[in-house]
């Protein structure tokens, strides 16, 4: 009989070294590790310090060599183009090995960074795995980010090449990528020598427009036709596999660094024990390869597990309707669907009775997993009622790379409680602390922290900046990793995650920084100061809302200023910021030391009980703001 959750969790806590060495044994290593945890640089930890492997070998070659080359690795389903395409493990391996040769031909080697800016097309998988094959470090940037955000990532990661496409397709418009790449390269101080472009029909801008500068722009297919296939290069387990930028409290994005060996183990372990997916199973993760959920469960997890992954280019609603997910489950016999609660809310809004389910057979579906934001009990009940399968919330972050709390279906399906992502995953020792670092009793909300070391697969540091890593995550509570989320544990050990303790917001499952938006607003000539807060939103979870104080003498109305600021945020951060609301106010509430009381503003806007700190400079400012923050009261 296989071990229960309780037994597995206890084993991981009792002897983590043994537990994670055993977990590593199912992978193919060029040099098997003899140790799991390396604490010699604590509080910075590394995993499998003497192990060597190649992640693309584990995701592809290993399955082909085991005789499963004909199994389907990847199904590309584009609702926006109306096409489907299957790749067997052998085919995908061939394409990855060839593109690894393309990267080599452009001088990309082990340790070099490659920035990937691609829509949801198979080239995303191919480019990521090709980097892994030669030990290059990829950094995928979500297509909804603007050139300025791309430029910031180019300057931080200093890539040797950019891999992109002529464009992405949104339901209402085509997004031209080439001008965005060119603009980003103009804005960045770092010079990128090579851009490799996958051609897609129907885009206005062509490669020839960019010829002649000091960057070489190449067509993907032309380079591939001349390239030699490349074998997997063994790298140290600690070698970075990728950098994934995420939003923090300040405007500057943080480059989360993922190692190779620890991550491969975490993917393998989580696919089996959390998602219950293995060879012969099909997983549809309806997210984007630009987010951590996409990295882990569209690309690496399912392929390392030898399963089939569905790459969906489309939306949950509008491509063409709210039955898209049901159609995908039916067409591809999906066993496990993974998406964000906001997608379920969008489907529910468009089709409250899920009438479109009647058009499809979803019998293959065994479970629906959701993550990215809190699964509100209402949406949870709706999904359970309509789908008739377990609906399983899991809580994690870009930083951790895989779930911190989940219902580990692969081990044992635990009782569900609405509003809770269930229990800490083996490897994560979760505690709730007050602001002084004292443990809080059951049921009391506080800072969710994780005892160090974090398990394999989690971030080892921030790119090029150990000190920022320590300052951001390890300093507030020595000995612990600070998640930035607040919540509580109940008497049964179930975790309830209630929201962020910092200025990070979550809009439609997209993690954004209000600090970055404030930076943009503050650059407008009429704005003296501003605050952006995340206000609760029925559909999107949260929406950013801006409050601005004008410079004296500024002569501009709210409507015009609003339009200008919305355009500025869209230009500087991107459409993904979804910034649409601006109010002009006489003053912002502040403490006597000048700190804007954003939390109080947010509590008022959300209709929650709010506390005004005794250090407030002028209490009348809050009174004046209440009708604006909460217009209905
Ligand atoms: N490239 C360019 N623009 C993009 C984009 C992309 N890849 N993705 C979104 N955008 C744009 C949208 O077109 C929209 O632009 P608009 O202001 O001109 O209308 C804007 O960004 C806001 O997009 P969004 O709020 O995401 O709305 P949407 O209608 O495109 O999609 C959802 C709604 C629910 C489908 C989408 O938000 C979603 O899938 N969220 C889940 C995110 C996720 O997977 N998170 C990871 C955890 S699972
Ligand atoms: P990201 O790094 O984009 O994955 O965002 C991580 C943040 O999203 C977390 O710190 C949480 O605030 C929030 N989040 C993700 N998943 C959940 C969940 N299942 N429940 C509650 N919040 C979540």
Image (tube, helix red, strand yellow):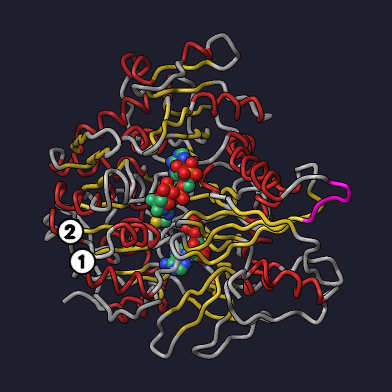
Label 2 crowding class (10 Å Cα cut-off): few <14, some 14-19, many 20+? some
Q: Is residue 244 above or below residue 82?
A: below
Q: Are marks 2 and 1 in contact (CB under 8 Å)?
A: yes
Which residue bears the numbered disc 2? 357
Where residue 341 sits, quadrant-wise, is bottom left
Q: Where does the N terminus fall, quadrant-wise?
A: bottom left
Secondary structure beneath label 1:
helix
Q: Residue at the location (45% across, 31% down)? A: 175
**Left or right relative to 270: residue 439:** right
Secondary structure beneath label 2:
helix
Q: Residue furthest top?
A: 212
Q: Is residue 56 above or below residue 185?
A: below
In reply to whether residue 497 is colored magenta, the answer given is no
Q: Where does the C terminus fall, quadrant-wise?
A: bottom right
**Span highlighted in magenta in the image:** 549-554
Quick one: 148 or 560, which is closer to the camera? 560
Could you tell which of marks 2 and 1 lies nearer the N-terminus? 2
In the image, residue 158 lies at what x, y percent? 60, 33
Quick one: 109 or 506, which is closer to the camera? 506
Q: Residue at the location (24% across, 71% down)? A: 390
Q: Is residue 430 above or below residue 119?
A: below
Which residue bears the numbered disc 1? 387
């Amino acid at each position: 009989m296989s071990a229960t959750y309780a037994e597995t969790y206890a084993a991981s806590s009792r002897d983590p070294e043994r537990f994670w060495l055993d977990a590593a044994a199912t992978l193919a290593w060029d040099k098997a590790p003899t140790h799991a945890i390396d604490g010699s640089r604590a509080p910075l930890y590394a995993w499998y310090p003497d192990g060597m492997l190649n992640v693309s070998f584990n995701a592809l070659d290993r399955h082909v060599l085991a005789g499963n080359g004909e199994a389907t690795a990847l199904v590309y389903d584009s609702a926006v183009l109306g096409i489907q395409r299957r790749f067997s493990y052998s085919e995908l391996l061939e394409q990855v090995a060839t593109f690894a040769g393309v990267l080599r031909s452009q001088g990309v080697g082990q340790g070099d960074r490659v920035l990937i800016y691609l829509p949801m097309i198979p080239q995303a998988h191919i480019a990521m795995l090709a980097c892994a094959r030669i030990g290059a470090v990829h950094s995928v940037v979500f297509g909804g980010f603007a050139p300025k955000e791309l430029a910031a990532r180019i300057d931080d990661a200093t890539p040797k090449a950019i891999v992109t496409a002529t464009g992405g397709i949104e339901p209402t418009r085509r997004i031209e990528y080439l001008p965005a790449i060119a603009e980003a390269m103009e804005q960045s101080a770092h010079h990128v020598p090579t851009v490799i472009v996958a051609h897609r029909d129907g885009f206005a801008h062509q490669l020839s427009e960019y010829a002649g500068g000091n960057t070489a722009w190449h067509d993907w297919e032309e380079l591939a036709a001349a390239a030699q296939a490349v074998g997997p290069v063994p790298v140290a387990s600690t070698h970075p596999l990728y950098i994934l930028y995420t939003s923090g409290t300040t405007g500057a994005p943080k480059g989360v660094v993922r190692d190779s060996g620890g991550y491969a183990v975490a993917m393998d372990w989580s696919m089996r024990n959390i998602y219950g997916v293995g060879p012969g199973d099909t997983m549809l993760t309806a997210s984007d390869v630009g987010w951590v959920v996409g990295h882990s469960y569209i690309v690496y997890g399912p392929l390392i597990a030898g399963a089939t992954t569905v790459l969906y280019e489309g939306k949950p609603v509008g491509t063409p309707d709210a039955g898209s997910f049901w159609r995908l489950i039916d067409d591809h016999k999906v066993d496990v669907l993974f998406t964000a609660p906001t997608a379920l809310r969008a489907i529910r809004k468009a089709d409250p009775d899920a009438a479109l389910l009647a058009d499809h057979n979803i019998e293959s579906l065994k479970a629906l997993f959701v993550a990215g934001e809190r699964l509100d009990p209402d949406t949870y009940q709706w999904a359970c009622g309509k789908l008739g399968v377990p609906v399983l919330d899991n809580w994690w972050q870009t930083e951790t790379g895989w779930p911190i709390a989940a219902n580990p279906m692969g081990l044992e399906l635990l009782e569900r409680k609405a509003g809770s992502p269930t229990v800490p995953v083996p490897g994560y020792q979760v505690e709730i602390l007050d602001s002084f670092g004292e443990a809080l009793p059951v049921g009391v909300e506080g800072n969710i922290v994780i005892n160090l070391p974090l398990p394999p697969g989690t971030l080892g540091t921030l790119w090029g900046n150990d000190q920022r890593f320590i300052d951001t995550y390890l300093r507030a509570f020595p000995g612990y990793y600070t998640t930035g989320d607040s919540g509580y544990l109940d008497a049964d050990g179930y975790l309830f995650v209630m929201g962020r303790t910092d200025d990070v917001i979550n809009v439609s499952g997209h993690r954004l920084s209000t600090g970055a938006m404030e930076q943009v607003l503050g650059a407008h000539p009429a704005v003296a100061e501003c605050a952006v807060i995340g206000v609760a939103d029925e559909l999107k979870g949260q929406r950013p809302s801006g409050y601005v104080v004008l410079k004296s003498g500024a002569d501009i109305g709210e409507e015009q200023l609003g339009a200008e600021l919305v355009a500025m945020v869209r230009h500087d951060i991107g459409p993904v910021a979804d910034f649409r609301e601006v109010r002009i106010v006489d003053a912002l509430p502040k403490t006597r030391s000048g700190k804007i009381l954003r939390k109080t503003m947010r509590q008022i806007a959300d209709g929650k009980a709010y506390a005004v700190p005794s250090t407030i400079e002028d209490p009348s400012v809050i009174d004046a703001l209440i009708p604006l923050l909460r217009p209905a009261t």
